[in-house]
Amino acid sequence: MEQVVGQVVKQVMEQGAGIITRRSARLSGWVDRMVWVGGGSEQARAVYPDIYPVMGIQSVGQVSQVVGEVERPLAAAGLTGLHRELKWFRSSADCSTVLVYFRPEALFAWRIGDPRELVGTSYSLFDLGVGDWERERFGDARLSAEPERFLDLVEDLLWRQLKDRELDPWAEWMVDRIVYSGGSVRIEQLAEEAVLSRRQLERKFGERIGLAPKAFSQLVRFRRSMGTLAGEGRLAELAVEGDYYDQAHWVKDFKRHAGMTPGMVRRRLE
């Protein structure tokens, strides 16, 4: 069964698999949401592009990335940076995982790796040099299959890492500016507001987020489009709502990220 990861998830039960979403007040500056996914049979999961880097920690079972006919097992704790193309992952039966959706600017402030090098890639946390994680507490988190306890342990683990760090106010402002505009704000306008040349803006934004502001804006627009596909509006109307010049422009931009047209994705979501 396919599950769209990266959309706002409600607590549901699907084919025996549970999904629980938590929003943490103390991690709110860093983390958009945490999602526990567990139970159910072996399943493939389509992960569409989104604006959130995702950390995954499995307590039981195995998650693998699927590329063509090849499956690459992932580490028990890893990070997937921003990605601009559809990715496939497979979870073993009864796999239990916590997915942490970080704000786009969080990894730069945490210094967990160069955001530009993380784009489109999945890394083991220990490959990224996160060596000061409390090994005992990490082991406890992996061994806890109880959803709420598992979420508690992961949240506490992250809080210990992040509580003494500070987010970059400029990066926060820039991300919010693009997101609240729905990805439609012009790059020239952003540069003017930031009192930077376009080239300076692109370099500074890329160092903090991993993508150029235009590429990030395209992800924001794609994410917005994915949200509208669940509705009943006609595709031509959705293109207009997304501030695209016409439906053909929207379809081309959408296909670049999803690998298929909006109509094809809508049918998969039904």
Image (cartoon, rainbow, N blue to C red):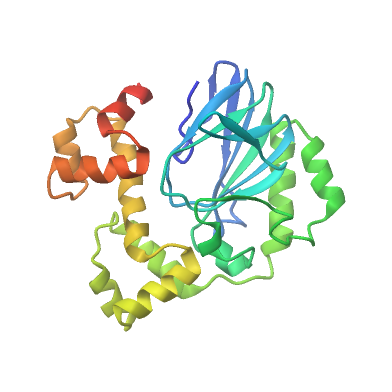
175 vs 53: above or below: below
User: 260 or 49, which lies in front?
Assistant: 260
- At x 70% / y 53%, what residue is drawn? 125
Q: Quadrant of the C terminus?
A: top left
Q: Position of residue 170 (x, y in %)?
A: 44, 74
User: 221 or 202, which lies in front?
Assistant: 202
User: 173 or 4, which lies in front?
Assistant: 4
Q: Residue furthest right?
A: 136
Q: Position of residue 208 (x, y in %)?
A: 49, 69
Q: Position of residue 10 (x, y in %)?
A: 49, 32
Q: Name the quadrant containing residue 192.
A: bottom left
- At x 20% / y 38%, what residue is drawn? 238
Q: Residue furthest front?
A: 69
- Position of 252 with respect to 24 (left or right) is left
Q: Position of residue 116 (x, y in %)?
A: 51, 63
101 vs 148: above or below: below
Query: What number of labels is visible?
Result: 0
27 vs 16: above or below: below
- At x 43% / y 75%, what residue is drawn? 204
User: 149 or 211, which lies in front?
Assistant: 211
- At x 48% / y 74%, what residue is drawn? 169
